[in-house]
Amino acid sequence: MRRLGWVLAAVLAACGGATEVGPAQTGGAGGSAGSDSGTGDASTQDATPADASVQCVADSSTFIWEMQICHSASDCQIVQHMTNCCGTMQYIAVASEFVADYAKCEQAWVDGLPACGCMSGPPTADDGQEVKDPKKVIAECTNWTMSSGVCRTKVAQ
């Protein structure tokens, strides 16, 4: 459920950045460039999209998991997430009602990544499988608790 949060934390560690959240924001997943230290550190990330009503992370590295809550597979929509500054993509699933918020956060995240100059890795799904044909990526509502599940992606065989 918090895999994307761990992915974001790993990306930040790999690219040397930190993610900050503004106080009056709600719903998404990413960051935009910003540093008020005066040092010009382009790797510092601020998870504040242009629309300050959208919160992208719950704290310094945890993705807002509520964006992935579902009650059936039809609640989930596949979106893409750039996992690192090299451009590696992951197909993830978010609840349909949060697709627009997610898009804002993802754009802010991508805009804030430094240019690393490294080769991107192959795209993957939440199940860790490499995505060779995007048409084979499916979203499902899984990891059920009392009344809801979590939107996740996998590569259909």
Image (tube, rainbow, N blue to C red):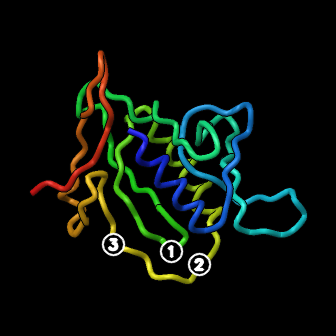
Q: Which mark is residue 86?
A: 1
Q: Which mark is residue 116?
A: 2
Image quarter for residue 139?
top left
Sooner in the amino-acid sequence: mark 3 or mark 2: 2
Q: Secondary structure at mark 2?
A: loop
Counting residues from the start of the chain, the first of labels 2 and 1 encountered is 1
| Residue 101 in view | no
The residue sitting at 20% across, 59% down in the picture is: 135
Quadrant for the C terminus in the image: bottom left
Please provide percent x and percent y for residue 106: 53, 53
Is residue 137 or residue 19 the one in the foreground? 19
Query: Which amino acid, mark 2?
Result: Cys
In which quadrant of the rendered image does the N terminus lie? top left
Mark 1, secondary structure of its residue: loop
Q: From the top left corner, tell me how far across and down residue 154 is, in percent.
A: 22, 51
Label 1 near label 2: C-beta < 8 Å?
Answer: yes
Is 68 positioned to the left or the right of 40 in the image? left
The single residue placed furthest to the right in the displayed view is: 38
Residue flagged by tag 1: what amino acid is it? Cys
At 38% from the left edge and 51% from the top edge, which residue is drawn?
79
Camera sees residue 132:
yes
Residue 61 vs residue 71: left or right?
right
